[in-house]
Amino acid sequence: MIMYNILTYGASADGKSVCTESIQRAIDLCEKGGTVYVPKGTFVTGALFLKSDMTLYIEEGARLLGSSDLSDFPIMSYPFEGKNQLCYASLINTHGAPCENITIAGSGTIDGNGSALFALETAENRAKRGRTICIRNADNITIRGVKIRQSPAWCLHLVYCKNVLLEGIEVHSKYDENGQIYEGIYNGDGIDIDSCENVRVLNSLIASQDDCIAVKSGRDTEGRRVGIPSRNITIENCAFKSGFGVAIGSEMSGGAENVYVKNCTFENTHSIASIKAVRGRGAYIKNIRYENCSLVNRSKDITDSRWFRGALYADAFYGEDEFDADAPAEINEGTPIVDGIYMKDISIYTVAGNAIYLCGLPEMPYRNIRLENVTAHGKYGMKIKNIENLKTVNVNVTSDFE
């Protein structure tokens, strides 16, 4: 294995000099199977573009820090929030062309400098905000050990990828290393798995400002036209410390299936699970399993609202302040199908929202939901509407308003 130390190519660890050209040169010169090595120190950089058959290794004590100069992040066409649109480049990227066999590893930190870039990108308003890492059109991706922090938008975004392993990583989009909140960031998801297949997230920690992990696949007409589902996703032995747990949707117009969340703990997150399939999306969400998961939430930052219904929730009216759950609409290509949600061995204590909230469409009820060995306490108890074939086995729900 050939090592390409970025210091050799002129990078400076002083935390001030912008090293984009030096680091990118090391990447470009890296031969097949080689490793670009980031040693201890802080290296300020703009957008970097990885290629096939390489490793980016970030040593313990090393930090890649996003530049605060917008000119270091070119505007490109990316999928974001379910549609292809202009976005500022992310700190770590792949090009649009297909690539494969990329590893990002080490014990160091990739810091998107989101508090600064959020404000700058929003003020300039030429494109949507960038991410810390955006890997797209890539197969056989491994991200192991690194800490990913402080993105202008979503922290780690995977788009149109197959065979992905995320193992032993930390994702922090709400707080810094000392527990201080990142100011001025919203919509700061931890990990977004977007039209991807065969993804494993193992032994990782996610402390998010929004959804901890979101499984997505495009939005409305464009998402159905592209038609690439997210499927075969396992999230196991992970700890979630803030945010909104593991979400499916609301952008799911390519479909989402075979998602398995197991052996995970949720601490001061507002939910374990959220299933969001609303009118206009179409496609389907099916075969979703949450098993052996526990939540203890004492945060009252968010209460019952259009963006959040409870600790376990499936919501066909996500994002709507007012709706009539008894008034059916015409069934068409934009009508989503939710079929097969299984939640087993779940323990919940929360002071915010409903313990359990399940609400489908009157014209297309959510189908085949099974709750087994569920103990849940919330501000409110359990609310159910437009659910077909709900089965409960050993379910105990209590609330503060009994």
Image (spheres, rainbow, N blue to C red):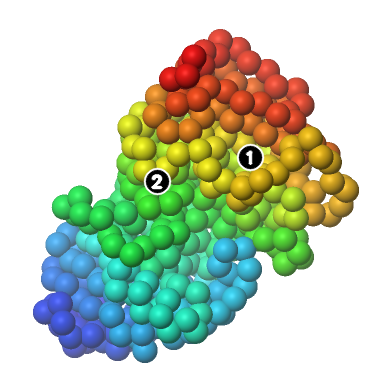
Is residue 225 rendered to the left or right of residue 206?
Answer: right
**Viewer-proximal residue, 328 or 230?**
328
**Percent of width and height locating residue 333:** 84, 54
Instruction: Please say if 363 is above or below 21.
Output: above
**Percent of width and height locating residue 193:** 53, 55
- Report the residue at 66% width, 53% height from top: 252
Can residue 176 be spotted in the picture?
yes
Q: What's the residue type where badge 2 is placed?
A: Gly
Helix, strand or loop status at disc 2: loop
- Report the residue at 52% width, 71% height from top: 99
- Report the residue at 48% width, 67% height from top: 135
Query: Tags 1 and 2 in contact by the CB under 8 Å rule?
Result: no
Give the residue pinned by disc 1: 315
Give the residue pinned by disc 2: 243
Specify which label sits upstream in the sequence, 1 or 2.
Answer: 2
Q: Bin the neighbour count of mark 2 within 10 Å (Cα to Cα): few under 14, some 14-19, many 20 and up.
A: many
Give the image quarter of residue 202: top left
